[in-house]
């Protein structure tokens, strides 16, 4: 069971509460509903289930399920771009080696690296929470 203290984010009631008269009570199992209310705690509904990538917030009185906001979407894209850069960096040696040997890079590696660049540039209007990463060529 979760409780909100003065509109704060719901949590398990602490093992020590301070009543309005200044006295404290310990042992959460023995608190009466009147003592809990007197100490400023309100029982809240259980957290609703949330499907990814939606978010669960607390507005001070109730749970709110919402879609990711612009800042959260930007943070997700930044994370994806960093992963693309890392994967491209990790395969740069293949390009350099082929160039130094005067060979052509295999089409599988060319396609893999282009797929990473397409993800980075969001060429196909990719959902940032459902990115399909290309398989590394063998």
Image: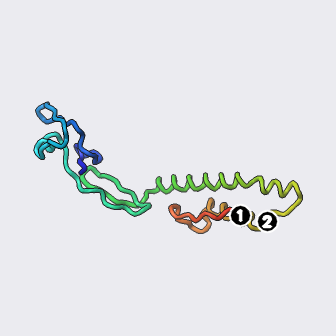
Tell me which residue sits at (28%, 48%) in the image: 10
Q: Position of residue 84 (x, y in %)?
A: 63, 56
Q: Is residue 14 above or below residue 104?
A: above
Query: Which residue was labeled with disc 1?
Result: 137
Query: What x and y, as percent, mark residue 49?
Result: 34, 61
* Quarter of the rendering containing residue 47: bottom left
Place of residue 5 in the rendered image (x, y in percent of width and height, measured from the top left): 23, 43
How many marks on residues? 2
* Residue at x 44% of width, y 61% of height: 53
Q: CA distance from mark 1 to mark 2?
A: 9 Å
Q: From the image, which quarter does the C terminus lie in?
A: bottom right
In the depicted structure, whether residue 65 falls above or below residue 7:
below
Q: Secondary structure at mark 1?
A: loop
The chosen color scheme is rainbow
Nearer mark to the viewer, of 1 and 2 = 1
What residue is disc 2 on?
Answer: 106
Q: Residue at coordinates 56% horizontally, 53% vertically from top-left?
A: 79
For this rendering, which residue is in front, 25 or 78?
A: 25
62 on left or right of 115:
left
Q: Are marks 1 and 2 in contact (CB under 8 Å)?
A: yes
The location of residue 48, given as percent across then percent down, is 31, 60
Crowd class of label 1 (few under 14; some 14 to 19; many from 20; radius 10 Å): few
Mark 2 secondary-structure assignment: loop
Farthest residue, direction right: 102
| Along the viewing direction, whichever of 117 and 92 lies nearer the viewer | 92
Image point 26% across, 56% down: which residue?
Answer: 46
Q: Sequence order check: which comes first, mark 1 or mark 2?
A: 2
Q: Farthest residue to the top: give it.
A: 22
């Amino acid at each position: 069971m979760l409780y909100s203290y003065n509109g704060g984010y719901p949590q398990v009631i602490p093992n020590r509460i301070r009543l309005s008269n200044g006295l404290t009570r310990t042992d959460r199992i023995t608190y009466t509903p009147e003592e809990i209310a007197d100490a400023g705690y309100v029982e809240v509904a259980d957290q609703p289930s949330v499907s990814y990538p939606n978010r669960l917030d607390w507005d001070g009185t109730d749970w709110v399920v919402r879609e990711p906001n612009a800042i959260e979407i930007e943070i997700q894209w930044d994370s994806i771009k960093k992963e693309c850069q890392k994967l491209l960096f990790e395969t740069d040696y293949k390009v350099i080696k082929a160039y130094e040997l005067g060979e052509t890079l295999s089409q599988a590696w060319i396609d893999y690296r282009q797929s990473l660049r397409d993800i980075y540039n969001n060429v196909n209007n990719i959902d940032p929470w459902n990115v399909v990463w290309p398989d590394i060529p063998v």
